[in-house]
Amino acid sequence: MPVSQGASNLPLQVGPNLPGPVQDSSSTPPHTISITYLTPAQAAEPALAFPVDAEGQGGPRYDPMTGQILSGWIVIRTDPTTDPSTITGQHVLEHEAIHTLNVAHAAHGSGEIMEPALVPGASPTLGAGDRYALAVVGCTAPTS
Ligand SMILES: [Zn+2]
């Protein structure tokens, strides 16, 4: 179960395939999280402005009146590091899924999933700081 769905109690689910890369959830259906694995050619597209050193990006779209998250977007560079069948790839996906809940980065070297830089071989297990940040944004489901 994706972190965003299980931990948040929000009615979010993985959305349908979209025709192209999305870095803005305004084009995703409400209550869905769009996940796109970019091909190398897509990641290099200047219009996408995908950072050269990033494995992925993610974020929410929320109602400006209530602050409630309506949908989310995740884009991940396709390479051996981000293969979702690997522990590291799962770590990248979980990190970006937490960004869809508007949780920002933890400190470098903190050992949290939300560290800004990927630590190869690191466990995709929520750290104490990750759990704290998720609780602050209203995630009440068990996170350990
Ligand atoms: Zn990040």
Image (cartoon, helix red, strand yellow):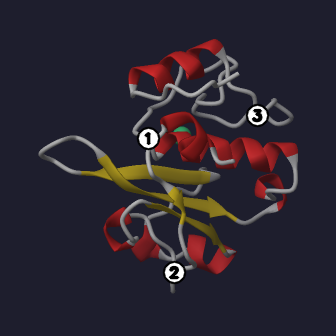
Question: Looking at the image, do the residues carrying marks 3 and 1 touch, with CB atoms under 8 Å apart?
Answer: no
Q: Which residue type carries mark 3?
A: Pro
Which residue is painted at 47% across and 21% down in the image?
135
Give the spatial CA distance, label 3 vs label 1: 17 Å
Going from the N terminus, do you reach mark 3 or mark 1 first? 1
What residue does disc 3 label? 124
> Crowding at label 2, few (<14), some or many (≥20) Cα neighbours within 10 Å?
few
Which residue is painted at 64% across and 48% down in the image?
2
Q: Which residue type carries mark 1?
A: Leu
Going from the N terminus, do you reach mark 2 or mark 1 first? 2
Which residue is painted at 81% across and 44% down in the image?
88
Question: Looking at the image, do the residues carrying marks 2 and 3 touch, with CB atoms under 8 Å apart?
Answer: no
What residue does disc 1 label? 101
What residue does disc 2 label? 18
Residue 130 in the figure: left or right of residue 121: left
| As drawn, 21 above or below 50 | below
Task: Depth check: give the residue in front, 120 or 11.
Answer: 11
